[in-house]
Image (cartoon, grey):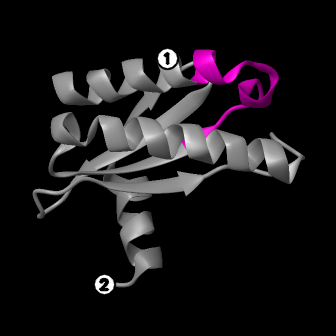
């Protein structure tokens, strides 16, 4: 299956966790390794430097929490208020959402 097809599968059949700064859509995969997809919208965050900062925060948090996310494909989308807060707040927010995935 192509990468686009795998994204579609997550969007169609995935469960959603909505937070203040991120929307996480996750879908159980056939592998034991977790996979991350990012859909950081230019509509909600105009500056490329800020979008890249948001992506770095998400990737780092995902890397630190890989052990609790085994067997899951996750796509992360930003919300309108994501670009207005500090890195620390974004990191804490996404950490809480990883744990919500683990508990489902």
Q: Going 36% across and 70% down the picture, which residue do you hit?
A: 6
Which element carries disc 1, helix, strand or loop? helix
**Residue 1 in view in this figure:** yes
Distance (Cα) linking label 1 and label 2: 34 Å
- Identify residue for label 2: 1
Q: Going 89% across and 46% down the picture, which residue do you hit?
A: 46
- Identify residue for label 1: 92
Quadrant of the image containing the N terminus: bottom left
> x%, y% of residue 76?
51, 44
> x%, y% of residue 47?
89, 47
Which element carries disc 2, helix, strand or loop? loop
Q: Which residues are magenta?
A: 77-90
**Residue 101 in which image quadrant:** top left
Label 1 vs label 2, nearer the camera: 1
Q: Going 61% across and 47% down the picture, which residue do you hit?
A: 55
Q: Is residue 51 magenta?
A: no
Q: Is 80 left or right of 18, judged from the image as shown? A: right
Alpha-carbon neighbours of circle 1 within 10 Å: few (<14), some, or many (≥20)?
few
From this viewpoint, which residue is outermost toward the bottom? 1
In the rendered image of this protein, does residue 21 appear above or below residue 46? above
Pointer 1 with pointer 2, Cβ within 8 A:
no
Quadrant of the image containing the C terminus: top left
Q: Is residue 80 magenta?
A: yes
Q: Going 29% across and 22% down the picture, which residue do you hit?
A: 100
């Amino acid at each position: 299956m192509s990468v686009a097809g795998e994204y579609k599968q997550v969007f169609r059949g995935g469960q959603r966790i909505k937070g203040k700064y991120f929307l996480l859509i996750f879908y159980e995969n056939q592998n034991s390794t977790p996979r991350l997809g990012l859909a950081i919208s230019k509509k909600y965050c105009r500056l490329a430097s800020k979008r890249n900062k948001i992506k770095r925060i998400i990737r780092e948090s995902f890397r630190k929490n890989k052990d609790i996310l085994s067997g899951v494909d996750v796509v992360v989308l930003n919300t309108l208020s994501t670009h207005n807060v500090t890195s620390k707040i974004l990191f804490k927010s996404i950490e809480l959402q990883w744990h919500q995935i683990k508990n489902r």
